Amino acid sequence: MRSGFFNSDIIGYNDNEMPIFDRAEDAEFFAKFFKSFFTNGVYPNPSTNLQVVIQEGMNVKVLPGLCLIEGYFGWEDTERVLAIQASENLDRIDRVVLRLNLADRVIDLYVKKGVAATNPVAPDITRPLPDQGGDIFELGVADIFVAKNSISITQQRITDLRLNKNLCGIVTQTVTGVDTTTLFTQLQSQITENMSLIQSALDETLAGDILSKLTKDMNTLVVPSNAVWTQLTTSTASTEELENDPSLINSWYTDVLFACDGTDYIELQPNVPTGELGLAFYNRSMANAIRLYAGANLTGNELKFMVVSKRKRNGVA
């Protein structure tokens, strides 16, 4: 097992009289360490990090900023001017990318020229195929529409891709929640066993009263398989939703009827494992409904939850 990082001892010298260390690790190991904590993308603050804006004529500029690609860190500390090739007789879409080049040991900015066409499309970004390796990994930060026979680029022709997690995305932590399914299953089993002991130890009437009260205090929320899931965008998401999920990783939501209001704080625990479905760890209470968030369209999946907490934000319900 490789592990680190530890102080190294000199165990010898090579032919050039350079020391040989017993605990030396390479940059790839260090990058893997960072990749385990943070996702690829540009850093979220300030909001202008590596933003592409107009400069003059057929030039654009990229504002200073920071990025992280596969655990490797990039920092552009000055404005960079990038030249866009002259327009042609047909429209074209060029793409500005951040490119990690492991062979050259560098991250830099490039303009990938598109193909002029009646209905142009942006060039693809380059990324290694899964488990096949490769030296190039790109993040797309902006698309630039180069109108035919044009002599300048306008800001309206620049499409910001930084919030598109498939092409770029915002650097966030990789651990966004803890799967407590196993612990909760054990807890439910213990509750069931304790209730059986209570029922056998007490007379039928008293046990019935206890079980009736326990049942009354437990609420179940069921999301039917035909529930409609809708996808949020940065323009449709509320301020609260963007605060909870700035990169809209869990951009799909559905509203489920439930006896609550918008000031209730609701905590849900799945009765069956749902973590692999990409369900968010947070929800939003509304008037007689709870909004659940997920990382994908979960239409066709029936989800069951136990309401383990329902309290007013400023007091107990």
Image: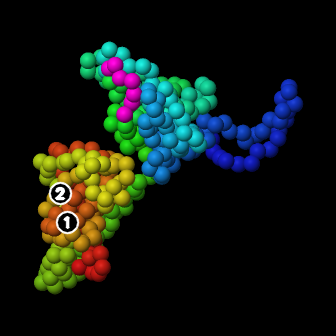
Residue that sits furthest to the right in the current view: 17
Q: Tell me how the rendering is colored.
A: rainbow
For the stretch drawn in magenta, the main secondary structure is loop
Residue at the spot x=48%, y=52% of the render?
A: 45
On screen, residue 61 versus residue 193, left or right, reads right
Residue range (magenta): 148-154
Residue 255, label in figure:
2
On screen, residue 27 versus residue 63, left or right, reads right
Location of mark 1 (residue): 286
Q: Is residue 4 magenta?
A: no
The picture quadrant where one finds residue 96 is top left
Closer to the camera in the image, 310 or 113: 113
Which kind of residue does numbered mark 2 sit on? Asp
- Residue 166, visible in the rendered structure: no
- Residue 184, horizontal then vertical, whole percent: 33, 62
Closer to the camera in the image, 82 or 317: 82
Q: Distance between the residues labelled 2 and 1?
A: 9 Å
Residue 297, label in figure:
none
Residue at the spot x=49%, y=37% of the render?
A: 62
Q: What element carries label 1?
A: strand
- Residue 165, horizontal then vertical, whole percent: 38, 41
Q: Is residue 208 above or below residue 70?
A: below
**Dot 2 crowding, Cα within 10 Å, few <14, some 14–19, many 20+:** many
Q: What element carries label 2?
A: strand
Q: In this view, does 62 lie above or below 58?
A: below
Residue at the spot x=34%, y=19% of the render?
A: 149
On screen, residue 62 versus residue 304, left or right, reads right
Q: Do the residues labelled 2 and 1 touch (CB within 8 Å)?
A: yes
Image quarter (top left, top right, bottom left or bottom right) of the N terminus? top right
- Residue 273, horizontal then vertical, whole percent: 29, 53
